[in-house]
């Protein structure tokens, strides 16, 4: 397809870049960042992954792009490790199902960490529930192998997929990310408020950190606080942007 050809060219010419979005605690202190892929198209400008990730997955190009993403994120970790205020900042990287299921995934991640010199304890990987469709034992084995090195795992877009609670209990996770769709209507839709509270209770009983995504207003943040949520990500705190624009403290 035309898009596949363009993606191949983008890989060759390194037309990708990573944006970073802040994650904050209840007092607005920066507690982490999420790396978000962007394609700097020579004619079409900046393209968000929603428009090409599916093609990257189906064509298999996500493997090469994913390696570039991990390497770039690890290089950013090394840069931060030398900057006051950022030295211990955790960075989360999105990993697609096809990428994670590749037989070389664990070796690739460890190789990139070694080559860049990034601290594995600062690296988090965000998985989605689509991964759970495949062999559970292999999935858990790979997660455990990476966790031995200190890498953390988040379940992204949580609540939108099909993960049963028994799966959730078996997975060696560190964090649940409440999908932004539930945060969006939190104040108007009692069902969404109930779902958010349920995810927070689940996280608490499974000893998982819970972070709310897509927080756009102070009112949403305040409601989440009263529910016992202490970690936030969203436009209210900062849009995804270049690493240089990531503020070390936010005071909304
Ligand atoms: O940043 P944006 O809202 O455009 O992201 C859209 C979707 O693309 C999200 O579902 C996000 O998880 C996914 N995405 C963003 N960056 C990456 C990446 O580096 N790798 C993968 N596999 N998906 C990404
Ligand atoms: O699927 P994933 O959670 O990785 O994707 C996160 C996506 O959500 C990114 O593309 C990012 O640009 C977007 N995003 C981040 N904060 C907000 C927000 O406050 N509101 C909305 N609508 N989107 C957001
Ligand atoms: Mn994510
Ligand atoms: Na998400």
Image (cartoon, helix red, strand yellow):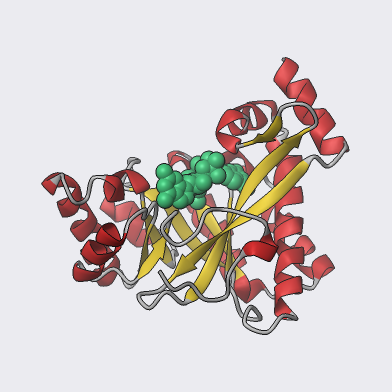
Rendered position, 236 above or below 180: below
Specify whether 40 is left or right of 157. Answer: right
Residue 142 position within the rendered picture, expressed as x and y whole percent measured from the top left = 58, 57
Specify whether 195 is left or right of 56. Answer: left
The residue sitting at 44% across, 54% down in the picture is: 235
The residue sitting at 19% across, 58% down in the picture is: 198
Residue 237 position within the rendered picture, expressed as x and y whole percent measured from the top left = 45, 62
Residue 172 position within the rendered picture, expressed as x and y whole percent measured from the top left = 45, 64
Give the quarter of the image for residue 220. bottom left
Specify whether 186 is left or right of 80. Answer: left
Question: Which is more toward the observer, 196 or 48?
Answer: 48
The residue sitting at 33% across, 41% down in the picture is: 160
The residue sitting at 84% across, 66% down in the picture is: 115
Q: Is residue 111 visible?
A: yes
Rendered position, 208 above or below 57: below
Q: Quadrant of the C terminus?
A: bottom left
């Amino acid at each position: 397809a035309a898009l596949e050809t363009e993606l191949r060219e983008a890989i060759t010419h390194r037309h990708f870049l990573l944006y970073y979005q802040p994650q904050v605690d209840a007092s607005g202190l920066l507690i982490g960042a999420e790396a978000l892929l962007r394609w700097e198209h020579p004619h079409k400008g900046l393209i968000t992954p929603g428009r090409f990730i599916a093609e990257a997955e189906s064509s298999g190009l996500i493997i090469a792009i994913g390696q570039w993403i991990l390497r770039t994120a690890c290089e950013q970790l090394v840069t931060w490790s030398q900057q006051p205020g950022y030295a211990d900042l955790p960075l989360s990287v999105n990993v697609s199902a096809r990428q994670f299921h590749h037989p070389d995934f664990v070796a690739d991640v460890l190789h990139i960490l070694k080559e860049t010199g990034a601290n594995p304890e600062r690296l988090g990987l965000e998985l989605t529930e689509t991964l759970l469709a495949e062999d559970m034992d292999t999935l858990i084995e790979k997660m455990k192998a990476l966790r031995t090195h200190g890498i953390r795992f988040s379940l992204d877009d949580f609540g939108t997929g099909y993960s049963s609670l028994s799966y959730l209990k078996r997975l060696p996770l560190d964090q649940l990310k409440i999908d932004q769709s539930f945060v969006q209507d939190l104040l108007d839709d009692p069902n969404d408020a109930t779902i958010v509270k349920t995810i927070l209770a689940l996280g608490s009983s499974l000893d998982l950190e819970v972070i709310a995504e897509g927080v756009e207003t102070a009112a949403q943040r305040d409601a989440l606080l009263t529910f016992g949520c202490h970690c936030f990500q969203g436009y209210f705190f900062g849009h995804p942007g270049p690493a240089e624009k990531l503020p070390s403290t936010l005071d909304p």
